[in-house]
Image (tube, rainbow, N blue to C red):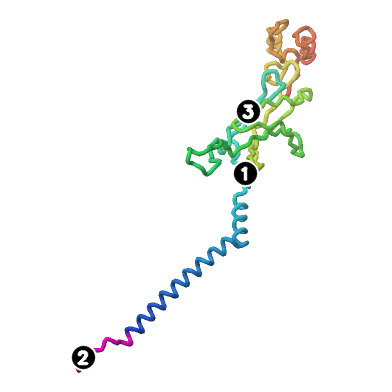
């Protein structure tokens, strides 16, 4: 039984607001489903495959390793070979990297190094063309090489040596050059001071006829320091490089 002045429970404005809220909720749900479907489509589409390939390309190693430190070179006893030494590249460090994504048993790892080795080059100071000759290649962690390929019969020569760093991808650093190395090889210059004098004769006399001797005093290279070597020394007495 309704009384005069009582408010009716039917409110058109309230129903309209409820319908509007329901409509917004349905639209939001549809939009979410649409975005979800779009994400699935993109993952399965050729465009996604192209994105994956681009990622692989981005991982390509095209950066050269850091160069070596100071390079030094000097003649060895006898004057028939040169030792080249250098400090390691800052990238010449062995580290462990995982080889699988299964870490349930502690995982598996491999030792890797960003440096594969070092190239050693030689050039003659008087070569106007600046031609380089590769002396050798050594592996990571090595800091010296002996060059026994110099032409000692050519007399006095001036050399420069360069060392570059190579990584496993073949990228090569800028070479670092040594100071000039001068071949003081004069027949009979046993103390390498650039001339043949009586000081050298003293060295020769100390090695004459001995089973163990300074290789430089065996001038003719026959394995014995004898009179033949003395005559070769005497022929060159007074010679100098200056």
| Front of the two marks 1 and 2 | 2
What label does residue 1 carry, if any?
2
Residue annotated with mark 3: 144
Cα distance in 3D space between marks 1 and 2: 95 Å
Name the residue nearer the viewer: 111 or 39.
39
- The kind of secondary structure element at disc 3 is strand
What label does residue 50 carry, if any?
none
Please report the bounds of the magenta region as a residue range.
1-13
Which residue sits at x=59%, y=41%?
66
Q: Furthest-bottom residue in view? A: 4
Cα distance in 3D space between marks 3 and 2: 112 Å
- The kind of secondary structure element at disc 2 is loop
Mark 2 neighbour density, 10 Å: few (under 14) some (14–19) many (20 or more): few
Name the residue nearer the viewer: 12 or 80.
12
Percent x, y for residue 27? 45, 75
Residue annotated with mark 1: 64
Quarter of the image for residue 158 reads top right
> Mark 2 and mark 1 in contact (Cβ < 8 Å)?
no
Q: Earlier in the sequence, mark 1 or mark 3?
A: 1
Mark 1 neighbour density, 10 Å: few (under 14) some (14–19) many (20 or more): some
């Amino acid at each position: 039984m309704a009384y005069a002045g009582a408010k009716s429970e039917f409110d058109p404005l309230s129903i309209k607001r409820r319908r509007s809220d329901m409509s917004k909720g349905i639209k939001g749900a549809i939009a979410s489903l649409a975005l979800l479907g779009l994400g699935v489509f993109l993952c399965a589409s050729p465009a996604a495959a192209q994105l994956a390939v681009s990622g692989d390309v981005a991982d390509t190693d095209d950066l050269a390793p850091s160069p070596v430190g100071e390079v030094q070179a000097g003649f060895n006893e006898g004057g028939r070979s040169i030792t080249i030494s250098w400090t390691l590249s800052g990238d010449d460090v062995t580290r462990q990297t995982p080889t699988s994504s299964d870490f349930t048993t502690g995982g598996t790892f491999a030792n890797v190094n960003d440096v594969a080795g070092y190239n050693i080059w030689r050039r003659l100071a008087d070569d106007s063309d600046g031609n380089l000759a590769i002396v050798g290649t050594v592996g990571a962690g090595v800091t010296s090489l002996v060059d026994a390929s110099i032409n000692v019969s050519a007399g006095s020569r001036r050399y420069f040596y360069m060392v570059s760093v190579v990584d496993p991808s073949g990228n090569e650093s800028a070479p670092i050059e040594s100071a000039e190395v001068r071949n003081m090889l004069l027949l009979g210059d046993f103390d390498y001071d650039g001339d043949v004098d009586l000081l050298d004769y003293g060295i020769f006399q100390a090695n004459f006829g001995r089973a163990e001797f300074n290789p430089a005093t065996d001038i003719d290279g026959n394995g014995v320091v004898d009179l033949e070597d003395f005559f070769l020394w005497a022929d060159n007495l007074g010679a100098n490089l200056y």
